[in-house]
Image (tube, rainbow, N blue to C red):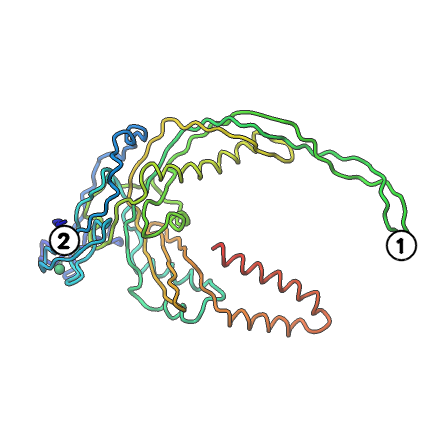
Amino acid sequence: MKFKSINFTCKNCGAPLRFSPTHNTLECEFCSSKESIKKSTQEIKEYNFQEALQHLEHNDEHEINKEVKCSKCAATFTMTPYSVSSNCPYCGTPAITKFVKEITPKSLLPFHLSQKEAQTYFKKWLGSLWFAPSKLKEFMDGDKKLKGYYLPHWTYDSNTDTNYQGLRGDIYYVTVERTVIVNGRQERRNVREARINWTPVSGHVSNFFDDITIGASKTISHTILDRLTPWHTDVLVPFNPKYLSGFDSEEYTIGLDNGFEFAKVKMDNIIRRDIRRDIGGDQQQIKHINTRYSNTTYKNVLFPIWTAEFKWNNKTYNYAINGQTGKVTGERPYSYVKIAFLVLAIVVFVGGALYLEENQNLLNSLDEINFHLNVQ
Ligand SMILES: [Zn+2]
Ligand SMILES: [Zn+2]
């Protein structure tokens, strides 16, 4: 399908303008002229979730390849189905098209960190990886490796009322006679032992959740996007295509209803924490919970993210940097050679006498290292 694209041009020299995170304006890459983006006074609204679900047609899953004609060089190129803005692959001019989904973002967080600043956060993070292969360290010295995306997110507000049933465990102590070994001889002695008394409990907790954010893109999974939180949604600005100029952007591929299912999981964790507190005692078991959600509202927003891709040993590692706060996340490749050398060094250092005992500790600490590498 053919799509028109727009771009913004410099009043001074006619070259394309791009959004500059450093100046929070449009900037000409040719003559450095700046053009401020008029601050809108439009308020950032919340939208009724139930109403939206009723009106949504559930047939907007079809993919439309957008054929876009560059307004500068007149070349035609294809954008991926969910892309809204990109740069012309032939002349580099920003191309901004329109959203096709039923719900469009009414607000966004503009890029706050420039590519250079994001690169600094990224290098610092990579530098903190002990076992990173040297190739990765070389990679981080290269510039222009980061690509800026505005990625779609849902935010949800909700009031929850939860009824629960469970067990409260209170510890008490009893004195019992046990056979113990004293100086190699068996003896009967009285010892104190802990027991738990479980009592059935039930109750009710209420919560209010404000702006639970859920990534709605398939380019970067919502689990990776989760690790970029928190987003400071108090500084959202009304949508304006000028902020997209020069950046790639996407519309949602995780629907409003599916996004809310992910939000429920996040809310459930907090509700369960509150239930445990409500039950009290020394230990708690939650047997059954039933949550009612009311006054649920949502927003569809775009958040700024710098991304990088690192290919090593036939595997691609993805990185993402929060374009507002500089928080970095990604998979950590590590060099087995470096780990092997470390193990060898520790074994030599520890020496013969302590070998067996320390070896166990070493194995434990390696397990920990593995654990950390896997969860990061
Ligand atoms: Zn200019
Ligand atoms: Zn072009």
Q: Is residue 198 left or right of residue 231?
A: right
The answer to whether any part of residue 1 appears in the image is yes
Q: Against 200, is 115 above or below?
A: below
Percent coordinates x, y for residue 269 in the rendering = 49, 38
Label 2 crowd (10 A; few <14 / some 14-19 / many >=20): many
Q: Is residue 215 left or right of residue 15?
A: right
Circle 1 SS class: loop
The answer to whether any part of residue 238 appears in the image is no
Whether ligand 2 has any atom under 8 Å from the Cβ at mark 2 is answered as no
Label drawn at residue 183 = 1
Percent coordinates x, y for residue 148 in the rendering = 28, 55
Front of the two marks 1 and 2: 2
- Which amino acid, mark 2? Val
Q: Quadrant of residue 234?
A: top left
Q: Is residue 358 left or right of residue 10?
A: right
Circle 2 SS class: strand
- Mark 1 to mark 2: distance in Å? 87 Å
- Which amino acid, mark 1? Asn
Q: Is residue 221 left or right of residue 97?
A: right
Percent coordinates x, y for residue 357 in the rendering = 70, 65
Label drawn at residue 69 = none
Residue in the image at 51% along x and 26% along y? 163
Residue in the image at 60% along x and 34% along y? 285
Percent coordinates x, y for residue 313 in the rendering = 41, 69
Please give the residue where the numbered disc 2 appears in the rendered image: 68
Q: Which one is in front, 205 or 119?
A: 205
Label 1 crowd (10 A; few <14 / some 14-19 / many >=20): few
Q: Against 234, is 5 above or below?
A: below
Residue in the image at 88% along x and 51% along y? 182
Residue in the image at 35% along x and 45% along y? 215
Upstream in sequence: badge 1 or badge 2: 2
Query: CB under 8 Å between callouts 1 and 2?
Result: no
